[in-house]
Image (cartoon, rainbow, N blue to C red):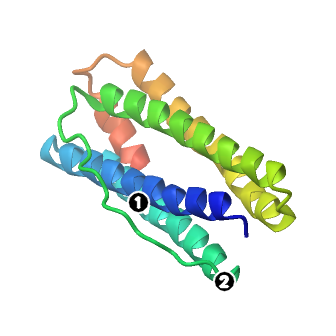
Amino acid sequence: MEKKLAAALNEQINHELFSAYLYLSMAAWSETRNLPGFAHWLSLQAKEEVGHAMKIFGFLVDRGERVVLDAIKKPETDFESPRDVFARTLEHEKKVTALINRLYDLSGKVNDQAAAIFLQWFVTEQVEEEKNASSILETLKMLKPDSSAIFMLDHQLAKRE
């Protein structure tokens, strides 16, 4: 594997693990606001991000590349509201989409077909990630911040499997 691509995939592992940290931080904030459904949804999102990191980890190992882990920066811990949490979630997912797209482009530039095929899964996954965050954010935009509808949405988010 081209060294530049291997290094970029290693960096993406860090980005995916940071995503997990960010969502865990948001889950912790939600718990302190008595929003266990939001916390549940965000905790599952964190687990999913760890899964993404491990998928890349496994791909690098399968290709005979060394995985080099770097420090994960501390995520934000304070949020204004559930709406703020999901506005930041959507913004973050858009950043991850841009990172994945750059990886996909790089795999083409170095003519690594295996990496391009592997990364196609992530390209498709990011469409779903942005859609989910956007959908919840749009619902939150329709609700008054102190309304009982927030608790109904919280109950709905608790059903995520």
Question: SS at mark 1?
Answer: helix
Circle nearer the N terminus (1, 2): 1
Residue found 54% across the figure and 30% down from its top: 134
**Callout 1: 10 Å neighbours few (<14), some, many (20+)?**
many
The residue lying at 82 percent from left, 67 percent from top is 114
Residue 37 visible in the displayed image = no
Residue 3, horizontal then vertical, whole percent: 65, 64
> Does 62 appear above or below 127?
below
Q: Which disc, if any, is residue 17? A: 1
Residue occupied by mark 2: 64
The amino acid marked with disc number 2 is Gly
Measured as percent of width and height from the top left, residue 160 is found at 47, 56
Residue lying at the far front of the rendered structure: 3
Horizontal and vertical percent position of residue 127: 67, 41
Q: Position of residue 57 (x, y in %)?
A: 55, 73
Mark 2 nearby-residue class (10 Å; few <14, some 14–19, many ≥20):
few
Q: Are marks 1 and 2 in contact (CB under 8 Å)?
A: no
> Disc 1 residue type?
Leu
Nearer to us in this view, 43 or 21: 21
